[in-house]
Amino acid sequence: MIEVDVESLGVRALNERLHRLPRDTNERLWKITNPKGAHALAAGLDRPLSIEIEGHVGYYCGGMNKQAEITINGHAGPGLAENIMSGVVRVKGNASQSAAASGRGGLVVIGGDASSRCGISMKGVDIVVGGSVGHMSAFMAQAGHLVVCGNAGAHLGDSIYEAVIYVGGEVESLGSDCIEKPMTDEHRSKLEQLLASAGLRVQAARFRRFGSARRLYNFKVDHAAQY
Amino acid sequence: MCGIVGLFLKNSALESSLGRHLSAMLSALSDRGPDSAGFAIYRNPAPRGSIKVTLFHPDPDFGWDRLMREMSEEIGTKVRGEARGSHLLLTAAMPVETARHWLAHHRPEVRIMGVGDCIELYKEKGNPKEVVRRFGLEELAGSHALGHTRMATESAVTTQHSHPFSTGLDLCLVHNGSLSNHNRMRRWLSRHGIEFQTDNDTEVAAGYFTHLLGEGATLEEALKSGISDLDGFYTFAIGTKDGFAVVRDPIACKPAVLAETDDWVAMASEYRAIAHLPGADQSRIWEPSPATVYSWQKH
């Protein structure tokens, strides 16, 4: 394992070092210490690395991630794993607003709570939150899954397209065009798979499913005269 | 973008290092607000019957000694002063209104930055690291303090447009965000006797809270009213004589982090500003909820 003190090396030097690793690198295990809220740590990676960050991180940690598995032993600031493409970004503590924003693939696991706008404009990423999420989560979500083991704040799934939301606790309110849908065996099995890949031992039985009523983003020929 | 910080000490043994910690917090957020910086520090309560007034004049050779001499002679009471950069902290045994009236008539070019028993308020154009050095913040002891680093969006970059803004005796406000109904609110407050020095949106919020507190509202009531009356984006931190408060708008897109240990409570736009405080690693850290008032007071 390669250990790097980011406070002495600097974020830019660390990220450059990670970006320059060859495709067949043997330097796969990394431990990053003293993040002290620094921004953009381990952002833009495209190698199958395993990275542990010891402490709290600032904005955009693991942003645009491909392939790498990043674990944060602390809390994360805004924009955790924003635009993630593949791989896994895991935070043991809480994540601030806009976690996994516009993520296209991969898995984001938040052990604690996520703040507002979790999964905003998600486009294929799977997000599993052990605690609760704040208001406007999954706003304009297009594809992927958002699993919330705790409660969801106001306006969940506002203007949602085709993403699927599972909530284990209470939902404060649903956003425009987001509705509750039946939980079939197929959905329960998908949820169990997501919980298992996140490493959470939570019963899938108590979850409810939410998704798009498809009234907002579909063109209705009856309304043609109004345009 | 702007940066705001606040530090409230629960353990009085740390008071001698308040300035050093606040200075590090402000410096950590220099890149969120490189245009200007300011801070309010609560320290050295004035003797009974006296007030502390922080004054500003941009001329480094301004005649502070003459001002104090004339004020002292004409009002007939001892006036003491301590120059700090472009500011003067004046302590005098007189009612607040006497000091305001004298200054308005004899030195209208001097700005009053803050007034109260404990508050001292310093702010200036320039990079925050340079501003805190100019005011010697590192050496200042105190019980609690707020600070701001400004990236101007709404109005000009001047010392007067910098934060904190005074909102009444021993009260001040720092703001990250922008208000959208400040022009109408300014006109309304002007009709109710609130005076404004600039066209800045945050000064309107400060004036709004001053107005409500003057009408008898508690700080908590005033902040709750602000959630419905002030339209826009904000994380506010408000300094009071014996504590501080934090509130965010209902959309809450302007960041804020709170952290607490047995020794202190800190707030900042980002954790980076808190990370270097003693025991920050082990502190309880959370994000303040939208439209919720958080406050701390000395017991």
Image (cartoon, helix red, strand yellow):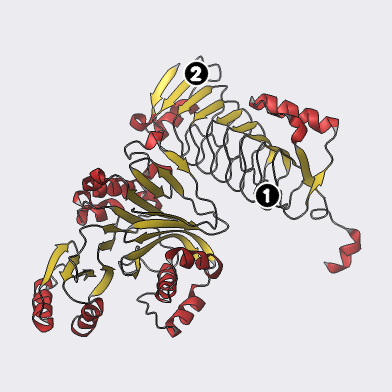
Out of B255 and B52, give the one closest to the viewer.
B52
Chain for mark 1?
Answer: A
Mark 1 element type: loop
Label 1 neighbour load within 10 Å: few <14, some 14-19, many 20+: many
Give residue B222's position: percent from left, percent from top.
47, 68
| Image: A93 above or below B267 | above
Q: Is residue A216 left or right of residue B5?
A: right
Out of A173 and B39, give the one closest to the viewer.
A173
Q: Quadrant of residue B85?
A: bottom left
**Is residue B20 among the parts visible in the rendering?**
no
Q: Nearer the viewer, mark 1 or mark 2?
A: 1
Q: Quadrant of residue B44?
A: bottom left
Q: Which residue is mark 2?
A: A29
Chain for mark 2?
Answer: A
Q: Which residue is mark 1?
A: A139
| Image: A225 above or below A60 | below
Q: Are marks 1 and 2 in contact (CB under 8 Å)?
A: no
